[in-house]
Image (cartoon, rainbow, N blue to C red):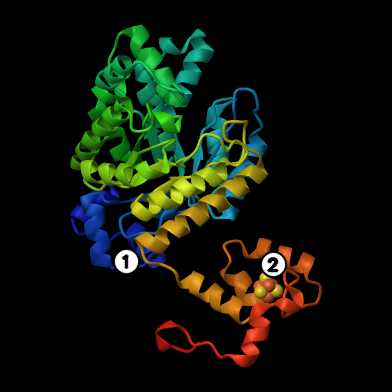
Amino acid sequence: MTQKECAENGEWTEAMEYVRKHERIENSVLLGYLAAGSVIVLHNKDHDNFVGIGKGLSTKVNASIGTSTTHIDLNEEVRKACTAELSGADTLMELSVGGDLDIIRRSVLKNTSLPVGTVPLYQAFKEAIDKYNNPVKMPEELIFETIEKQCADGISFMAIHSGLNLISLERLKKQSYRYAGLVSKGGAYLIAWMIENNRENPLYERFEDLLKILKKYDTVLSLGNGLRAGATADSFDRAYMQELIINCELSEIARDHGVQVIVEGPGHIPIDEIEANVRIQKKMSGEAPFYVLGPLVTDIAAGYDHISSAIGGALSSSFGADFLCYVTPSEHLGLPSEDDVAVGVKAAKIAAHVGDMIKLKRNEADLNISKARRDLDWEKQFRYAIDPHFAEKIFRSKNEGTSGACSMCGEFCAPLKVRKYFKYEIAKGKKS
Ligand code: SF4
């Protein structure tokens, strides 16, 4: 049985216990959310690690890694997986498109305790290119075989573009203009396949076959948006909305079959459209967990897109998005390095925390670090920092032997002077 079906039957599982222990949520509330599909649980079966995503839970961060067709280094991808985990990512997506995809996926799975996701269409299209030198020659059955193979390997969640059907495609054709065209790799190949073969998307047409496979392994379906905008000017266009509507319909069908399901969003989106995007997805999907890719709030931050996406991620999370896909400084420029992965995860973790401060009213760490700053307690400041080691490293490199003021203001340190004359009280009259 899937976690959703267990919850529907009132059965308390090891996965639920794990999530409850790591989050602040009561058993009955978690059970209710899982049964309703507003929370899902991912499982890394090899390492028996669980991650809950959705209503009432902290915002989670995904780090994507994977080879390209021009840069293939298995060991480097494994190291990136380890770096992502050490940096605090909650999940990993293995998105390789170059090299032996089975070997890469299985090596990454062996070396991380994070739940791992994939886009199985990548492998199906790559195998069609290898075999027929043409992705549109991909046999339909290969998609389903690839999905089952990856599920059997222990993949926890899959981004699948079932909502990109002939209706969505029609919307795109009628619209006929877009600044950034199409930016989803899986989406672009799928559209080519549908047009060349004059066929409906098999992942839509045979949605129930897909659900049967996912249900067998309790693999979470992440309904990808193949028409998502790649430019802020293209956001919320009719093609994206059409696919989102269909994905929301499909999420209902998936839940009715007991399958755990997430709906994916943008992409690129201006800051003033983020709230509407989250609220529309939540309402149309019946509160399915919402997975946003960034989102990037400007198109000009090349080299700094992790910052652009952290702004979008923080706002999305504050309005109710549940799952943020990180963006690295190499976005739009090249394959991320190990360092890029670490920086991208940190940026997204900050975004998730900023969102949770509003969404879940969680600001204990902020209060604690603020008090430590007031008291010039450096050890405590490091402890509550998002990256204690990095914060301490900067401090030690610039303040030899000091335990009081730092080199920023020296003798002009305000807390140092003021505490001599003034005793602070904590807000609401509580002393610390
Ligand atoms: S010296 Fe300035 S920056 Fe450093 S602790 Fe004091 S007030 Fe803060």
Q: Quadrant of ligand 1?
A: bottom right
Count every numbered label the image shows and give the total: 2
Q: Badges 2 and 1: C-beta atoms under 8 Å apart?
A: no
Left or right: residue 310 versus residue 399 is left
Foreground of the two, 385 or 27: 385
Q: Secondary structure at mark 1?
A: loop
- Going by the numbered disc 1, the residue's amino acid type is Ile
* Mark number displayed over residue 48: none
Q: Is mark 1 within 8 Å of ligand 1?
A: no
Label drawn at residue 392:
2
Which residue carries the number 1 mark? Answer: 25
Tell me what residue is drawn at x 44 percent, y 27 percent.
184
Tell me if I can see residue 101 in this picture: yes
| Residue at 80% across, 77% down | 401
Residue drawn where x is 42% and y is 11% of the image: 136
| Residue depth check, mark 2 versus mark 1: number of the one nearer the observer | 2
Where residue 63 appears, as percent x and y from the top left, is 52, 44
Instruction: Residue at 46%, 19% (x, y): give it.
Output: 125
Gap between marks 2 and 1 measured at Cα: 33 Å
Quarter of the image where one finds residue 70 = top right
Q: Position of residue 4 (x, y in %)?
A: 25, 50
Could you tell whether 236 is left or right of 364 in the image? left
Secondary structure at badge 2 equals helix
Disc 2 marks a residue whose amino acid type is Glu
